Image (cartoon, rainbow, N blue to C red):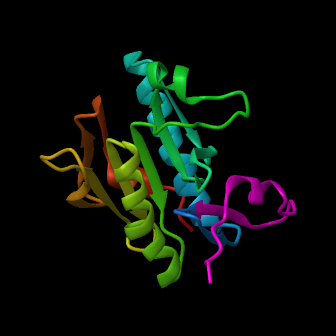
Amino acid sequence: MKSLRWTSKDLDAFPEDEKRYEIIDGELYVSRQPHWNHQNVCSEVVTLLKVWNKQYNIGGIATAAPGLIFSEDDDAAPDVIWISKERLATALQDDGKLHDAPELVVEVLSPGSTNESRDREVKRKLYSRRGVVEYWIISWPKRQVEVYRRDATGVALVLIQTLFESDILQSPLLPDFSCQVSEIFVDII
């Protein structure tokens, strides 16, 4: 018996409701609307990236929750991305979705082992396969940021460092970007 593989076309048939639907390697993932603190962290990360981008005139764009369709069976919705204008020129298609990897993807963990496993394992593997250069996983309850970058072979995203509120977040991908990790959690209630 053949197992069911979900596709982007299947997502088009789903109702407009309060849930987030993603397909990774043909498997359907459904999440509830995010927690208030989750959304505040996403907003703060987008703001920090946008301010840096304008200040240094880097030529990229940060945004929250873009549609990211790598293939018919890999249709994800990361929390935040930063993409260079060069990559955006070919990645953004007529459907208003990205069809190529942004350089930076940020996921803010949602409560529950299933959600955490999806971000730490399933999505990290997807983003590794598809060419994401850097991946941040943020935990607002723990107030920490895990930074993943491509390994020496350029194949996989591996954990480089775990940063806490008193640490400074910097990246070779984002020249002159620097923020104290506590800035990301400024509006946590």
Task: State the extent of the magenta-drawn residues as a range.
Answer: 1-23
Q: In which quarter of the image is the N terminus?
A: bottom right
Q: Measured from the top left, where is residue 114 in percent x and y?
A: 51, 81
Q: Residue at x 54, y 62 (%)?
A: 24
Q: Measured from the top left, where is residue 160 in percent x and y?
A: 19, 56
Q: Measured from the top left, where is residue 135 in percent x and y?
A: 36, 51
Q: Is residue 38 above or below residue 116?
A: above
Of the pair 104 and 152, the residue shown nearer to us: 152
Q: In which quarter of the image is the C terminus?
A: bottom right
Of the pair 76 and 135, the residue shown nearer to us: 76
Q: Residue at x 47, y 57 (%)?
A: 107
> Based on the displayed image, in which of its 4 quarters is residue 57 positioned?
top left
Q: Residue at x 70, y 63 (%)?
A: 20
> Based on the displayed image, in which of its 4 quarters is residue 38 positioned?
bottom right
Q: Is residue 87 a member of the stretch shown in magenta?
A: no
Q: Main secondary structure of the magenta part?
A: loop
Q: Residue at x 52, y 38 (%)?
A: 47
Q: Measured from the top left, where is residue 27 in percent x and y?
A: 58, 70
